[in-house]
């Protein structure tokens, strides 16, 4: 497949080798959610195909690892350039299967992809190189101690539909940089971007079989967990629990990036114009389908009405429609058909319990695409699903709170803990509030952008996940730790070995007393 337009033209089947064939019953149609058109079919891979992919991946992994950081980095840097050189094809493919705006794809997928290929090429060695350790243990003095990170072997990556590059291929990059082979199972809703990247990586010199895409539904993901050495999962908390159980059954490590319900706190001294712009952008960006999007807002009473007025005016100005090109629209369609019902349900539930809807809230039932209008809800509380469950749509519920204490209490009243934001001009206070918010990443006077700092760990607290992506932990999770102890200056026999004698007993006792016998000084 070279462009999505070709796929639209012949509705071909696209397999992991990028080859086209005619469609059959064991295939999954890929739909453009903004237009309702079928644009391709992909194989619904069964356990046998997954097992064969695993054999291929395992066979080529040692040679890939043997290329070293420099050799692997060369391929990754070529992929970085490929993304920049083929930006339009890349964006067109993502937009065709997600319905998002071109700008959404440019900011969160092209920029992320280009940055991530370079970052992991440049930093893998720094995060994974051997560490020499000095021990305080007396019997090991003089020995050489090394901590080494070795690739785990074959990594399975399972991704969601909201960011077909960033949360699928993106998580494969550090795994590859660490010397592993990867099998990626993208979401059945958005497989075309991953297939395109498999082809692109081959063009960039990635040896055959090192990065493979297997397409399919949940069962294919389940089959993948059964054959890999580690699973990196991004998706809903519900599926994440199933993946964690399956990984536990095999005693393989798993890293989980799951759902969120991110709070956004506006204190009375905040720059309301900046806060309103951020609340609107980061709740509507990508159609609100971002794990770390602004899902609920708490505003201190004195500035509530002014903040709401600003937000409503800005949301009214948003243009929604089919994303035909750059600048065409602000907010695209939803991507996943059941999501339309979830958003409708949350808004209707809030309305029935007394919420007001100053803008949005009335989807056009005759639209061919999956469109829900950008919507603001006010007069909301925690009896409403819109404030407690992940909506994952273009909605912005705003709740009035008495003070900062109530804002913190409400923000933390959630099973999720992915990201959070606080707006205040008092930076000291902002940092203190940030430290009390239960989330893996917190912004003061900003939102979401910390995700793009690849040096910063990004992971969820509570039911939002286990482990993290980015930073040292974002690549070390794809390795196994090996400690090596080298004894350089050797007696024929060490004093603690057989036969046990009274003399040696005393000697060891003296050593213990010398090193540890001083104890507490007060
Ligand atoms: P999902 O859980 O329905 O599906 C995710 C993936 O898991 C898909 O590829 C699916 O085919 C696969 N899958 C389904 N059942 C499986 C099983 N039993 N075993 C293995 N794999 C299985 O999630 P979704 O609807 O695709 O994505 C939306 C969710 O993802 C939202 O909750 C969102 O918050 C979350 N998300 C989180 C992050 C993050 O970084 N924390 C990023 C993006 C999305």
Image: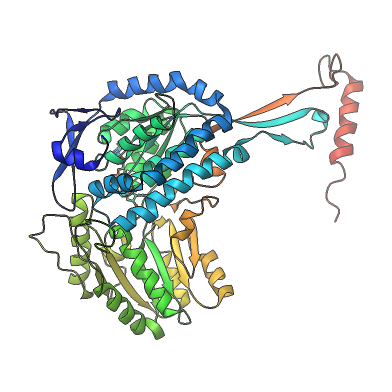
Colour convention of the picture:
rainbow
**Left or right of 468, for residue 314:** left
Question: Outermost residue toward the right?
Answer: 503
**Left or right of 353, for residue 288:** right
**Left or right of 35, for residue 410:** right
Residue 514 visible to the viewer: yes
Q: Nearer the viewer, residue 410 or 126?
A: 126
Q: How many marks?
A: 0
Picture residue at 22% right of the left edge, 60% below the top: 343
Percent x, y of residue 279: 37, 70
Question: Outermost residue toward the bottom?
Answer: 302
Q: Nearer the viewer, residue 19 or 337?
A: 19
Percent x, y of residue 429: 56, 74
Picture residue at 38% right of the left edge, 23% below the top: 54
Quarter-wise, where is residue 19 in the image? top left
Picture residue at 87% right of the left edge, 45% below the top: 518
Task: For the C terminus, give its image quadrant.
Answer: bottom right
Residue 391 visible to the viewer: no
Quarter-wise, where is residue 344 in the image? bottom left
Percent x, y of residue 15: 25, 29
Identify whether 69 is placed above or below 459.
Answer: above
- Ligand 1 found in image quarter: top left
Task: For the N terminus, give its image quadrant.
Answer: top left
Identify whether 232 is placed above or below 101.
Answer: above
Percent x, y of residue 124: 57, 38
Question: Outermost residue toward the front?
Answer: 85
């Amino acid at each position: 497949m070279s462009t999505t337009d070709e796929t639209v033209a012949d509705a071909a089947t696209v397999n992991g080798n990028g080859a086209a064939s005619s469609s059959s019953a064991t295939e999954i149609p890929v739909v453009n959610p903004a237009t309702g058109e079928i644009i391709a079919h992909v194989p619904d891979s069964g356990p046998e195909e997954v097992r064969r992919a695993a054999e291929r991946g395992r066979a080529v992994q040692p040679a890939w690892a043997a290329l070293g950081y420099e050799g692997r980095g060369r391929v990754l840097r070529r992929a970085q350039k490929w993304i920049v050189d083929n930006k339009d094809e890349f964006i067109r493919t993502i937009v065709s299967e997600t319905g998002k705006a071109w700008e959404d794809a440019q900011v969160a997928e092209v920029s992320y992809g280009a940055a991530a290929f370079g970052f992991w090429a440049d930093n893998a060695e720094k995060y994974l190189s051997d560490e020499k350790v000095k021990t305080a243990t007396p019997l090991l003095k003089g020995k050489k101690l090394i901590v080494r990170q070795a690739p785990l072997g074959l990594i399975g990556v399972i991704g969601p539909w909201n960011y077909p590059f960033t949360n699928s291929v993106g998580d494969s990059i550090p795994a590859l940089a660490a010397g592993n082979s990867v099998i990626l199972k993208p979401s059945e809703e958005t497989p075309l971007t991953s297939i395109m990247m498999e082809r692109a990586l081959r063009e960039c010199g990635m040896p055959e079989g090192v990065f493979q895409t297997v397409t399919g539904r949940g069962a294919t993901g389940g089959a993948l967990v059964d054959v890999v050495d580690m699973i990196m999962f991004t998706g809903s908390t519900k599926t994440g629990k199933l993946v964690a159980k399956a990984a536990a059954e095999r005693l393989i490590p798993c890293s989980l990036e799951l759902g969120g319900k991110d709070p956004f706190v506006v204190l009375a001294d905040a720059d309301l114009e900046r806060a309103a712009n951020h609340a609107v952008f980061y709740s509507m960006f990508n159609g609100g389908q971002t794990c770390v999007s602004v899902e609920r807002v708490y505003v201190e009473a004195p500035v509530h009405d002014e903040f709401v007025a600003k937000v409503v005016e800005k949301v009214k100005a948003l243009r929604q429609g089919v994303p035909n090109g750059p600048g065409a629209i602000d907010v695209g369609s939803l991507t996943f058909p059941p999501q339309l019902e979830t958003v409708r349900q949350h808004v209707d539930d809030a309305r029935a319990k007394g919420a007001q809807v100053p803008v949005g809230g009335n989807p056009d039932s005759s639209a061919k695409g999956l469109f829900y209008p950008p919507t603001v809800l006010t007069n909301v509380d925690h009896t409403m699903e819109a404030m407690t469950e992940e909506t994952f749509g273009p909605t912005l519920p705003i709740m009035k709170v008495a003070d900062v204490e109530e804002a913190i209490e409400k923000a933390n009243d959630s099973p999720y803990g992915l990201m959070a934001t606080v707006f205040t001009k008092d930076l000291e206070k902002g940092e203190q509030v940030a430290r009390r918010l239960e989330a893996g990443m917190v912004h003061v006077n900003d939102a979401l952008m910390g995700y793009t700092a690849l040096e910063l760990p990004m992971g969820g607290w509570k039911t939002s996940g286990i482990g993290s992506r980015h930073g040292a932990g974002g690549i070390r999770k794809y390795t196994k730790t090996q400690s090596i102890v080298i004894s350089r200056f050797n007696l024929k026999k060490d004093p603690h070995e057989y036969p046990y004698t009274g003399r040696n007993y005393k000697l060891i006792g003296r050593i213990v007393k010398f090193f540890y016998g001083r104890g507490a000084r007060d």
